[in-house]
Structure formats: structure tokens, C-alpha cells
Amino acid sequence: MEELKPRPASCSPFTPLGFLERAATVYGDCTSIVYNHTSFTWSQTHRRCLQLASSLSSTGVGTGHVVSVLAHNIPAMYELQFAVPMSGAILNNINTRLDGRTVSVILLHCEPKLLFVDSLSHSLALEAVSLFPRDKTPPLLVYINDHDDAAVDSRFCCTYESLVEKGDPNFKWVRPKSEWDPIVLNYTSGTTSSPKGVVHSHRGIFTMTIDGLIDWEVPKQPVYLWTLPMFHANGWCYTWGMAAIGGTNVCVPKFDASIIYNLIRKHGVNHMCGAPVVLNMLSNSPEIKPLENPVKILTAGAPPPAAVLSRTESLGFVVSHGYGLTETGGLVVSCAWKGEWNKLPLTERARLKSRQGVRTLGLTEADVVDPESGLSVKRDGSTLGEIVLKGASVMLGYFKDPIATNKCMKENGWFYTGDVGVMHADGYMEIKDRSKDVIISGGENLSSVEVESVLYTHPAINEAAVVARPDEYWGETPCAFVSLKGELTRKPSEQDIVQYCRAKLPRYMVPKTVVFKDELPKTSTGKIQKFILRDIAKGMGPSSSSSSQVSRARTRM
């Protein structure tokens, strides 16, 4: 067989863009997008994306260029996930919850030719562009006129719909010459450091898209509600995934629990994604009532407390839990569920489901290793190590940052995530912390996630996060930040919460300080921004181990 070599017919580059072309053929008359009073079919979405790609190409945008988008979950945002790379350009989705300075830094770093902006991001985009140095040329601004009566600012060169209208519906979209060509540039959320530009290839995104559909067992033609921002890792690649299986994309620009429940009932939603904060909001909403039909919800982004999982599933949501990073393009580890676990009590099922799990089919390997020796940690569920991954969906690297790329993608072939976890005896891994979030108290490594899981079981606590506070004797002690549920007949005191934790945790893990907040600072995807809380804890000064007094600090964000 040595004479048999790869030939052009067997070497067509993988790309997720072909999913749209197929959807127009197989699901052409089926609904692709629903948003308020607007709806499109898959044949219409395919045509609109070709027209937009044609217009981009005619303006000089092409291979190697970056096109940025600052928009919420609206039809145009979905179309841009296809149209921009169909022109040959690289798509850069920007987090709409960033401040103007950070958006400006991202734009200066990736140097896009165009910036698409929706009405809700109008002021943010203009602020970001105004911060450009005089010697730097800002991108041309394109206004996404998602409200028909909205006036177009003169600082925008044209509207989104004008580009669609003038484009050629028969445009031959630009296929990648190599499946390793970049398709997207996504910036990390910046929960622990400045955002870094993550570059993914057509091959990686193709693999992640198919892998995500298989692992979550998504059937053909689901009704998918966009509670996860599309700008976050391209919606974990379900933007392209819904085209692959002819799903209906129900768009919602901002999360509101009452609106979510209404859309579920109105459109028969059966699939959605979101961070654990979404589960928390759904299970604490005044609109709570059991669902008429089960809704599958995939969660990731932070370890979900077992108490939150239990409350959510009691309403009729079927929760699946996974783990991934911007650097992997989606979820590459999932808590693969075993049938025999359904016989266990609800609390035990929730505990098992809160684990991140095992690698998905598309990932080559996943492990928890000692960061010094590189050897696998014991499978005892308690020995801490760093989570490492390898596989097709791992990024190409960080844009313009070879030092950071080499730091996490090492010569031994592993991608080092910076997440601290354990490996259980059954081969399922569980995240315990980010490496920067581990608290070292008296020489003991303390997992903030374990303390948070206990805090979430308190009936009055809505949100919880635990960080290190300097201590005169122990070096560091746990400092808990909490927000309380509304309409409480009696609000717990700091001492009440400490006593609650003492009954459930080893003494060294009990928070020595409790700080009440109206709301904890979060990224757009629900990750609590612990670097902000760490700064607050440090600013409070060292705690005194000789005193059992709990901080009476009550501050507001």
C-alpha cells in the first residue's frame, strides 16, 4: 500500500463554513433564526451570508484581514459568524461587557479593517475608537440597524443591511487553502490577566463543532435558545453547530429570567447553554414553575455548586456539565453520565454532575499533572495538579504573543490550562481552582471552590466567591464575598455564615472574613471576577488570627 498517497480529492480542508451550504439544501424551508418579529429560513440565511461576504470582498477585505464585531445575540451576529470567514477574513468577536479602554486595546492589537456595531454597543464602540492614538487609524464602523427607526450616526460608514442588499447572492465564498488557516480570533475574558488573542484554525473549529454536537447528543433540528453570548468562544461553536443540524436559533440580546421562561414556552425551546450563574438566576426567578417539557441545558465556565444543580434540575431542566476554555474553542471535557447514577439520591447525583468529567471524543488526551515533574497525580480525588490537554481543537496560539504561547504550549506536547484539579479513582477529573485562586493557609493548599460549594447551600445566599486575604499569622485566610437573595425575612449576619461553615468544613477552610455585596462582579459569561475581589481583600489589610471577630464590612459595587 506504500504507493497510495493523499490526493487532492482526499485533501479538501476541513471548515465549518460548509455546514451553512448544506443547511440551505437540506433544511432550506425550515426556520433558521427567530428574533422578536423577525424570522429567516436556512435558504434565506445562506443567501444573506453570501451577499454580506460578497460586499466585504468588494471593499477589499480578504485573506489575512481581521473583521471585528461588537454585538449581542441578534440575527446579524449569527450571520457574521459565517459571512466574515466566507470572505476569507478572520472573525473577531468582542465582549460587549468590556469597558471602552479594553475594547480600544483589543482593536489596536488586532487592527481590524471593519468594526460591526449593534445599537446597544453604539456608545461603547465610539468611546473605544476615540481612545485611539493620533498616529493610529481606527477601523471603519458599520452600524447594525437592528431597530428600523434608529438613526444612523454619521461616524458610521454604512449600515449592515446596505452591505447585505448590495452583495452578490451567487458569490463563490473563499474556501481555506489549508485547514490550518486561521478562522477566528477570540480574546480571553481577562478574569485573571489582560486579554490575550486566541487564534483558532478551520480544522480546530470544525472538530470542536462536530465534537460538541456528538458529546451533548444534540438531535437534528433542535430549538436552541441563545442564552450564551455568541461572542464567547463563538457560542462554544454552536453557532456553526446549529447549521450542521438545521436547528432553530432563538435570539435574545440580554439575559432576563422572565423573558427566558416566556421564550421557552412560546417557541418550544429544548436546548440552551449558559454559565452556572444562568442556572442560579433561573432557579431563583419569581417566574419559577415546573417546565411543561424538559429543556436540556449545558453549563460550563465555572464549577457549578451542587446545590444550584439540584435546584435547577428540580424544575425540569436536564443539566449537562462540561469544561473548556477560549483556548479550546468549546467544551472538551464533559461529565459523561452513567445510567446507574440515575438511581442515586438527588444530592448525590448533583455532586457527581458537578465534576467536569472525562475528555470528549474530539480531544486526544486530558490529564491532571504535577506542574513540577509533569507526572500524573494520584487518582484519589484529593491530590491537586494542573489540568493539561492535547487535541485538534486546541488553539494555534496567542496572536502576536510567542512568549505566552510557548509558556502554556510546552515542548512535551501538552497545553497547560492554569486550572487546578484532581483526578478521581473512576477517571473523572474535577476542577478545584484556578492556579491563582488556590489559598495557602498555614502551608495547606485550600480550594476556594470547596468553600463556595458549602456557601451556596445556605438558604439565604445568592452568590458566593472566596479569595485569599493576607493574614498576620497564617499567611493567607479565606475571605468570603456573598450576595443575598431578595425578600428575606431575616438577613444572616457575618457570624451566622461563619458558624454555618464551621458545621460543614474543616476549621482551616472556614472563612475568617465575610463581606456582603449587592452583586458580585462577573464577566459576560457569568465568571466571577476574583481578581477584583482579591484586590478588595488585600486593601482591607491583614486579618488578625488572634481575633475571631468577623469583618463587619458591608460594601456596594
Image (spheres, grey):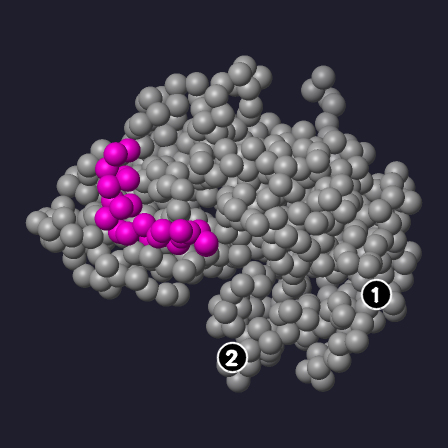
Whether residue 453 is visible to the viewer of this picture, yes or no, is: yes
- Name the residue at 49% across, 18% down: 344
Q: Which mark is residue 131?
A: 2
For image coordinates 42% across by 45% down, the residue present is 408
* Residue 521 lies in the magenta stretch: no
Where residue 501 sits, quadrant-wise, is: top left
Q: Badge 1 local density, few (<14 within 10 Å), some, or many (20+)?
A: many
Q: Secondary structure at mark 2?
A: loop
Does 241 sit left or right of 38 as displayed?
left
Q: Nearer the viewer, residue 515 or 416?
A: 515
Vertical side of 4 occupied by 111: above or below: below
- Report the span colored magenta: 481-504
Verify CB contact (< 8 Å) between mark 2 and mark 1. Answer: no
Between 351 and 105, the one nearer to me in the picture: 351
Name the residue at the left extreme: 546
Q: Residue under circle 1?
A: 164
Q: Residue at x 77, y 45 (%)?
A: 267
